[in-house]
Image: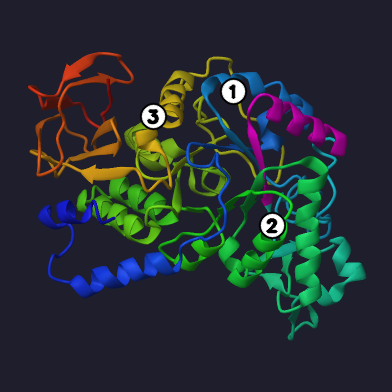
Amino acid sequence: MKKLMPLLVAMGIIACNNSETTKTNQATAKMVHNEYKKADWINTTNVYEVNVRQYTKEGTFNAFAKELPRLKEMGVETLWFMPITPIAQKNMKGSLGSYYACSDYTSINPEFGNLEDFKNLVKEAHSMGFKVIIDWVANHTGWDHVWTKIHPEYYLKDSATNDFKIASGMDDIIELDYKNPALRKAMIDAMRYWITECDIDGYRCDLAFWVELDFWLEARTELEKTKTLFWLAESDPLEHPDYFKAFDACYTWTWMHKTEDFYKKNQDKNILDTVIRQYDEVCNTTDIPLWFTTNHDENTWNGTEYEKYGDMAKALAVFSFTWNGMPMIYSGQELPNMKRLKFFDKDPIEWNGKYELHDFYKTLLTLKKNNPALRAGDPGVTTHLLYTTADKNVLAFIRKNGNNEVLVLINFSNAKTQFGVIEVKDIFMTGHYTDVFTKQDKDLTTDKQFDLLPWQYLVFEKK
């Protein structure tokens, strides 16, 4: 954030006379810094969320395995599998139930196959260079989880009903009691099972902020005696910054909601600039925000990315892949998927073999992987917001790491925009840059003028 601060002040995004606030933010960022050893591959990785049930007509691990070569060619690095554990039958929703209502933490959902099928899938993925993380639902289980019978003391109780406590009004799940040391140990042992048995590479932790932070610290300390893992939290650092003490990367829910409001309510772009600044303050140089335009929850309950963002969807994807942090793709975005997928019933993605956005995502994934200027959580990378003559419409920034540079220009408006980029002290753009999508060159030493159509974007890589 210290590299961004002078420009943000000059642009009027933040006030320049509140040094105490700046010091407080810097102290907070230092306080929540993750001191665990980080897996050496997370700085350049991306995340692809796999909805096994809806990915193929078969809805199995073996059927999904056939997609690995295509995903590899597209540039996918890390596969996140939604929960693979069996689903509780009591109070089950729909015909198949929710992935997130587990009945046994150390078994496989028979809907997807068996343990050997999953182990083989992980082995095949590893042989192709993928990393594999699985969804972990630590806050709650389904009503007939095996623990409800053999360890009912692991659960919170509802004093009014003298039964298990329902989790936040979702009547197919019940809450666990993290004040119980035995429950904590059992949960950590269950997590360790998937590392030792299947050699997974990390966890995406569902509703991580619903579980006490000290549990995650305990779990990471214990589990990393076995393997250095990638830890991804469904927790927004703007609301729960302390969770970066335990996790490598956290969700950007606030950005997702603010961008939808911006598009649908025709708001001022300053709202986006402000949220960007807030994430940079909290995430310092090593903590990683996860950027996305859709996921399983959003697609099902709130609409597809095109329902939410319309013509802005691809522009937001470009931001997700080029700003500080880690990008995520949800199953079917490369199609692109234009329908809401059912959550509790079979509803396969309607693949047609065209993969119209394959090349779009491949370009961004390749750039993210190969250009050191786009590394996430790397103190060697600096990000500079740029002045333009159309700041009300255009987000412009350049990221640098040594001699590597990536320039990004995004028109966050429904108007055609002509503008120039204005250099400021210590931030220069000289020499030849290549448009990563068109492969055309531009000499920015002499030409800093640009034209962008509504919601258009340009991404340049310095030659």
- The residue closer to the viewer here, 341 or 196, is 196
- The residue positioned 21% from the left and 48% from the top of the image is 269
Which residue is labeled 1 in the image? 72
Location of residue 18 in the rendering, given as x and y in whole percent from the top left corner? 17, 72
Location of residue 399 in the rendering, given as x and y in whole percent from the top left corner? 29, 38
- The residue positioned 83% from the left and 59% from the top of the image is 90
Give SS at disc 1. helix
Magenta region: which residues? Answer: 115-135
The quadrant of the image that shows the C terminus is top left
Mark 1 vs mark 3, foreground winner is 3
Location of residue 279 in the rendering, given as x and y in whole percent from the top left corner? 35, 56
- Left or right of 236 on screen, residue 207: right
Q: State which quadrant residue 126 falls in.
A: top right
Give SS at disc 3. loop
Mark found first going from the N terminus, 2 or 3:
2
442 in the magenta segment: no
- Left or right of 423 on screen, residue 404: right
Residue 137: mark in rendering? 2
Give SS at disc 2. loop
Residue type for callout 3 = Asn
The crowd level at tag 3 (other Cα within 10 Å; few <14, some 14-19, many 20+) is some
